[in-house]
Structure formats: C-alpha cells, structure tokens
Amino acid sequence: MRSIVYFIKEALVNSRRNIGTAIGAIITIFLSLLIVGVFSITSLIINNVVNEVEQEVNISFYLSDNAANANVQAMEAQLRSNPLVSSVTYLSKDQALQKFKSMPGQDNQNFVNELSGNPLPASLEINLVDPENVQQVVDSIEQNPLFTKIAQEPTKPDNSLLYGQEIVPKLFAASNIIRVVSAILVLMMVIVALIFIYNTIRLAITARKTEIEIMRLVGASNRFIRGPFLMEGAIQALVAAVLAILAIQFLVDFGLPLISNMIPWLPVSIAGGTVTLVCFALLVVGLIIGVLGSWLAMRKHLRV
Amino acid sequence: MPEQQTPTASQSSNDEFIDFLLSDQKTPEHTLKQQAQAVKAARHAATGRQQASFRPAAKPAIVFDRVTKVYQAQPGKPALNKVTLQIAFGEFVFLVGHSGSGKSTFIRLLNRELTSTRGTILVGGENLSTIKKWRIPYLRRNVGCVFQDFKLLPKKTAFENVAFALQVIGKSKAVIRNQVPEVLRLVGLGDKQHKRPDQLSGGEQQRVSIARAIVNRPPMLICDEPTGDLDPQTSLGIMKLLERINHTGTTVVVATHDKQMVNAMRKRVITLEGGYLVRDEAEGEYSLNA
C-alpha cells in the first residue's frame, strides 16, 4: 500500500519534471482515442442509417377495386400469421389518395384536384421482420390461391406487388459493404492508435533510461522500477481518455444536430446509451494501452 | 569514522546473504588477522592460477574460478580467458590493463550486468551463474558501483541523487534524512548538498556518485575508471576517499589505467592483458608498457 502511494507520488513528480513529454503523450493519446471514438460513432451512425433505409423496404400489395372484403381480410390474417411479417396495414382508396396528396416534392395537390374520381387502388402495406426476406414473402403471396382473386392485376403479379424489385438486391449488397468497410476502418484506426500511443510512451521511457539504469544498479527491484512508470502511463491515459470523452460528447451534442439538419432525408442520430458505451470503451482501452504500453516499453530496459 | 560505517539493524533484515556479509564486518578487529591471512592465501592462489581447489581461512568476498567471457559479436576472441583469482573481504585491489583488456567486463560480471560464458563467480558466497533473477537486486545492494561518467541524474540535487538510491530500494524517509547528509559529509560535500550536478566540478560529481554507491553501506564497492575524466590532483582526492572507505572495512575494487595513481598507492594490483590475468602482485606497480 505504501508503495502504491509512492508510485502515484513519483508518477506525478516525474510528470511535472518532464512536463513537455507528459503533455505530448497526453495529446497523442487524446487524439488517438478521439479519432477512434469519432470513427466508431460514425460507423455506428452509418449502421443506423443503413438499417433505417433497409427498414423502408416493404411490400405494397395493390388490391383490385372488386376484391371481396372477406377475401382481403382472410389474406390479411394469413399474412399476419407469417413469421417473416412484422405488420400488415390496410390502406383504403381514400387513404391512398390522401397519402399521395401529402407526399413531398411534387405539386400533387393540384394534380389530384384536376382528376375526376380516385384512380388509386386500395392496398395492403406489409412490413417485414427482416427486410432481406422480402423475396420469400413475395413468393408466398403469389402462390396463395387468394392472390388471383384480390390482386389488382392477377396476370401480372409484378404490377400488383411493389417492393423495389430492382434496387433491393443492390441496396443489400451496398449496405453490407458499408458495414464491413466501416468496421475495418475502425479496426485500422484502433491499430494505428495503439502503435502511436505505444511509440510515444516508448520514447518517453527511453528518454529516462539513465534513471532506470541507475535504479537497477543500486538494487531497486523491477517491481519498484516499473511501478512509477506504469502509474504514469495510467494517469496520462486516464487524463487523455477523459479529454477524448468530453470532446466526443461535445461533438454528439452540437456537431450531430448540424449534420442532421444538412441532410434531413437521412436519419442521422445515435442513442445516448451507445455514446456512453463508446466513451466507457475508450476509457478502458486507453487505460489498458497506457499500462500495457508502459510495461512493454519498460521490458527492454529491465532485462538483467 | 568507523562507527559511521557500522551496519544498521534495518539493513541486515534484507536476507541471510546480507547478514552473512555484514557479520564479517561487525568485528573488524577480531577478523583482521584472519583476513590478512586470507589475502596472503588468495594472492598465492591467484599467482598459482590453476589451483582452484584451494580453500582460504576466511570466506573470500570475490572468487573467480576459470572465468571466461565470450561476447557474441566476437566469438573467436574471449574478453576474459580462464581468469582465476580471489579477493578477500576488506581488500583494496587495482585492476589495470589497456583498453580492451577485459577490465570493464570484469567489473560488469561482478554486479551481474553480464554473465560468464564458462567458469564460476562467487560474490559474498553467492554463485552468480545460478542466482535467481529476483535476488539480483539484493546482490546489487551489496555491491556499490562507481563509473567514469558518474551517472548522476542532472535534474536532481546532490542530496536527491543520493537519496534516490535509498528511495528506490524502499527505505523510509527517516532513514534517508539521517543517512544522506552523513554520507555527503563523509565524501566532503556537506556544504553542497543542494547543488545540482551542473553546479559541481567533475571531482565533486564523482564524490556524489561515490556517496550514492556507499550510502546503503554495501560491503563491496566496485569502481570502473573512477578518475578517468579527472585531473591528477582531483584523482588523488578521489583515491584517498576510496582508501578511507576501504579502511572502514569495505572491499574496494578499482579498474583504472591511471599509472601514477596505482604506483603511488602501493596496493594489490591485478593486471589483465587481452583477457588473460598476467600479473597479480601484493604491492604492485602499473607495469604495462603504455
């Protein structure tokens, strides 16, 4: 216990004596952790966006105006019982018209007013548990005997079932690539940060190799020599991690809203819990790197 | 002076090895005769060179038995070649030789910075080839080291440099406050305790480094070219100091090529040449052709 106090005191005294090196190490660790943190959070946000976009893949089942209510309800019930389907909503002709009117972008309001009657069909809007199964669900609908009875154009199933046939496979391919690439980038940044931090600590320790040599010569045990250096690494890493966490919180609180205002059509956001988790991970990783890096860098000087 | 060098109780608690070393010091008058005999016998053994089975009356401080050291970089040319000698407790020994004769290797083998390639080295009865790694720091606490380049920490004062040696082996503040000023007075720096190395002359810096080496009162002091960077007058002062330390019972080994000094001091001189022990004389002279 007395030696722990001694280690902490020595670490603080040494940091003050070599204030330049200490600040350099803290800045290096801080920037490395910040970059890793920003990359992780960006990658998580991208993942969120990709998930959201994927969730928008659903099936619109256009119904014939003459479809019997009983048949439609039977179909709805069967779809609900399908484990791949998460929800089914019936959209009447009127609701479809209202939805069309309120769609952004075009001047739909005037367009609709010039029409006589309602050309839009009623539909079943089908959402999926996992959007990647869209083709399976579509196939099962087409094979259902009720399909020909209620579909708008039974002979051309592609016209009755709308689910972005062309873009869905490309979307999934792209989103998988984005996930893998962002994960690899984060991993690379972690490795770069590790090497960066290790080198900084190694330089700081090499600069004091006379001190270590003298300690060895006067018979200090390795534990006693190592203690203050490990403590110093831990303290510096801790300070740097806290700075990185503050910076990341700042970016999430103030930077993220700016970005999401610039691209309102993408759901740029991240859960507060996830940010906390990332921050905690940074703290732990920083501490481990600080202590382990010091340990590794000391090894060479402690060989007897 | 002798009472300053009497070992304290706190030191002897380290381990039995230290107890053993210190027990030899506690009664210097009593064992003086024995030691003198041992010195004689050791010299005899050293000049006889290959007689390794020889047993002296008292346990010697340092034993080299056919020690060979080969560096990996020069596999064909051993730095030390079958060196056999003994040094008794309380002896003052000069180790002389040209550059590359093996002096530094000899010194570095003594504090286990290096290990011998072949042969046995005993320091205070401890076999340095088989010593456990965790015991090496304890060995070094019993072998004070002084170097040509002083190896002082430039940002610490004389007091702090000496205190550092006690701090890192876990001595309490009370011990430090008590022993450091005392040892600095002993080496003649009582009034310069709070000067940094760059505010001290070369000789004074070497005195600080000697103070650091003996503050823990080790039974042995080894010096590698302690006067190598100093002028003759200052060197003489350092040598007198080392002699004074020797008179308190500490075994002193000094590697040097300071011819005048060696000849003036009339001490035992061990001469190395090309890794071989070529001479070992009781009141020797520096007899290499410089």
Image: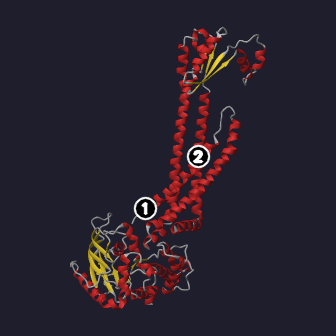
Residue A18 image point, x, y percent: 57, 66
Residue under mark 2: which chain is it in? A
Q: Residue at x 46, y 76 (%)?
A: B150
Kindly state the secondary structure of the residue where label 1 is placed: helix
Q: What residue is shown with label 2?
A: A278
Q: Residue at x 31, y 76 (%)?
A: B125
Total numbered labels: 2
How busy is the neighbourhood of tag 2: few (under 14 within 10 Å), some, or many (20 plus)?
Answer: many
In front of the other: B117 or B255: B117
Which of the chains bears the disc numbered 1? A
Q: Could you tell me the amino acid type at mark 1?
A: Lys
| Callout 2 secondary element | helix
Q: Which mark is residue A76?
A: none
Question: CB atoms at circles 1 and 2 under 8 Å apart?
Answer: no
Vertical order, A261 against B19 (above or below): above
Cα distance, mark 1 to mark 2?
A: 33 Å
Question: Badge 1 is on which residue?
Answer: A300
Work out whether mark 1 precedes mark 2 in sequence or the reverse, and give the earlier one.
2
- Please tell me in which quadrant of the rendered image residue B49 appears: bottom left
